[in-house]
Amino acid sequence: MNLFLETVQVLLLSIWYNVESFVHLFVPRKRKNIAGEVVLITGSGSGIGRLMAQEFAALGTVLVLWDINQDGLKETARLAKQSGASRVHSYLCDCSDRNEVYRVADQVKREVGDVSILVNNAGIVTGKKFMDAPDSLIEKTVEVNTMAHFWTYKAFLPAMIANNHGHLVSIASSAGLIGVNGLADYCASKFAAVGFAESVGLELLATGKDGIKTTIVCPYFINTGMFDGCQTKWPTLLPILSPDYVVKKIIQAVLTDQVFLLLPKTMYLITALKKLVSTFSVLFHTTAQNSLSSSLSMTRTYQPARIAPTNYAF
C-alpha cells in the first residue's frame, strides 16, 4: 500500500473511531460477560485495588490478588469472597522487583492458570518537589508505577497472545496526560505508563491480536488517602473523585472494551485543549522561524550588494 492510500486509510479510521465514540456517548456499548475469567489485580490490598476486587468478584470471576501488605490482602480476599468471587488467591509480591514478579507469576500459572484480565493498579507517590525527592524514592516511583507494567506484561501477555484473548488494564492518572506542579517524578512515571500501554495495544492490533483489549484509566485525584492534602481550585470542573465512582466507571470501561477512560469527563476537554494549544504553538513557532529565516536570508542576500561599492570606493 502506497503512502497516499495509507494516509487516507488513517484519516478515514480516525473519523470512524471519533464518530463511533460520539455515538456511544448516547448509545451504551454492549457489556461482555467475564464470568470465569482469571483477573489479577496488583496493589489490591487497599484503596481502588480492593474496591475493584469486590466489583470483579460480583461478576463471577476468579481473583488473583497481589500486594506487599499481608493483612490488607487477607481483608480484600474476605470481602471478595463475600461479594461472590468463585475463587480468590492471594500472593505477596513487590511489583518493583522484576525477579519477584516473574517468580510469583510462575506460581500463579501453576496454581491458578493463565491470567486473562491483568489490572496494573499498584502505584506510589513521593509527594515531594523534584529537587527535594531522594534519588531512591524517585527510582522506586518509576519501578512501581512504570517498570512493574513491563514485567507483568512479559509474564502474562504470552498466554493472551497464544489464545488471542485477554484484557490489559492500566490504572494510570490524569497526571500521565498533563504535567502537575510538585509531582515531576509521579507525572513522568504515569506518562510512561500511558505511552507503554497504548503502544503495546497498537502492537497487538498490528499483529492481528484484536482479541486482546486495552483499557487505560486516567483519573483526576481520588480520595483514597494517597493524595491527602491535595486541593482543587475548581471543584466543579475538577472535583476530588470518590473511589466508588471511579471503580464503577473502570468496571464499565472494561466490560465495554473502552480504550481510554478519563475522569471526570472534563478531562477529555482539558486534554483536547492542551493538544490544540500545543499544535497552534508549534505552528506559530514554525511560522515565526520560517519568517525569521526568510528575513535573515534576504538580509544576507542584499547586504553585500550595498556594502561592496563602499568597499570598492576605499
Image: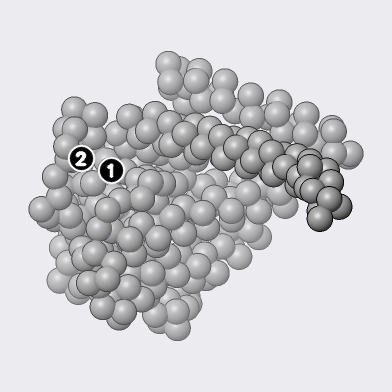
Label 2 CA crowd tier, 10 Å (few <14, some 14–19, many 20+): some
Q: Secondary structure at mark 2?
A: loop
The residue nearer to you, when weighing 168 against 112, is 168
157, above or below 179, in the image:
below
147 shown above or below 235: below
| Label drawn at residue 80 | none
**Residue in view at x 61 percent, y 46 percent:** 211
Q: Residue at x 33, y 29 (%)?
A: 266
Extreme residue in the right direction: 2
Task: Give the labeled residue for mark 2.
Answer: 241
Q: Are marks 2 and 1 in contact (CB under 8 Å)?
A: yes
Figure quadrant of residue 120: bottom left
Helix, strand or loop for disc 1:
loop
- Please tell me whether residue 193 is drawn above or below residue 105 in the rendered image: above
Between 241 and 300, the one lying in front of the other is: 300
Q: Nearer the viewer, residue 197 or 249?
A: 197
- Identify the residue at the far front of this view: 314
* Mark found first going from the N terminus, 2 or 1: 1
Q: Amino acid at mark 2?
A: Leu
Residue 37: x %, y % from top left: 45, 52
Q: Calculate the distance from the C-alpha at mark 2 to the C-alpha at mark 1.
A: 7 Å
Residue nearest the viewer, comparing 269 with 147: 269
Give the number of callouts: 2
The quarter of the image holding the C terminus is bottom right
Q: State the residue position of label 1.
A: 220
Whole-percent x, y for residue 229 in the image: 10, 53
According to the image, what is the colour scheme of the structure?
Answer: one colour
- Residue 58 position within the rendered picture, expressed as x and y whole percent measured from the top left: 28, 44
